[in-house]
Image: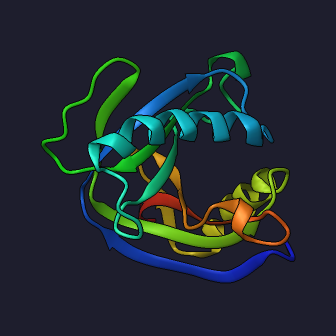
Amino acid sequence: MMNNVTNEVEVKDLPETTLAYVRYVGPYKGDGKLFEDLFGKLFQWAGPRNLLRFPETKTIIIYHDNPEITDESKLRVSVSISVPEDTAVDGEIGKMTLPAGKYALARFELSDTEYQEAWNWVYRSWLPESGYQPDDRPCFEMCHNDPKTLPEGKSIVDICIGIKPL
């Protein structure tokens, strides 16, 4: 059992959410600097457009591919924030919709090197005993803080998986 698991996995219905995102293709595991740069780019775009309204603005990292199946050079990740539906995007900034539905949200406090272990715990420990199975919606991390604000530099994250009954 991981020592940074809160043991809180909440199953809840999330609303459809419009996201503005920056996409990256390639290896990302344990690369905190990469995510910092991607968020920097996104926030630099969003700030002048008055789209950063924390805590209402949700910060979400979507993983489009399973790293156990997809070659790491082809892994796609989208660093995103929730935005109003009518937000105009351009250049490197894309827009997509995160589908509504039932999700499992597992809360963790993680350093850059602990994400894999956390995802493994959700899929290998919690999910098989939950009575649910993953559906085909993307899984993602919802970030709740700037890691620089915690003494250990950890991120407070919900790992979110679209689920349906077995």
Colour style of the rendered protein structure: rainbow
Relative side of 88 to 135, left or right: left
Residue 57 shows in the view = yes
Q: Is residue 1 left or right of residue 157?
A: right
Q: Is residue 107 above or below residue 94?
A: below
Q: Horizontal and vertical percent for residue 112? A: 80, 51
Residue drawn at x 20%, y 51% is: 84
Query: Quarter of the image containing the N terminus?
Result: bottom right
Res 67 seen here: no
Q: Nearer the viewer, residue 146 or 76?
A: 146
In this rendering, the answer to whether 82 lies above or below 15 is above
* Residue located at (34% from left, 68% from top): 56
Q: Is residue 10 above or below residue 99?
A: below
Q: Position of residue 70 (x, y in %)?
A: 65, 24
Q: Residue 42, how many percent across, how many down?
A: 46, 37
Answer above or below: position of 134 versus 4.
above
Task: Looking at the picture, tell me which residue is in the foreground, 44 or 114.
Answer: 44
Q: Tell me what residue is drawn at x 45 percent, y 77 percent.
A: 11
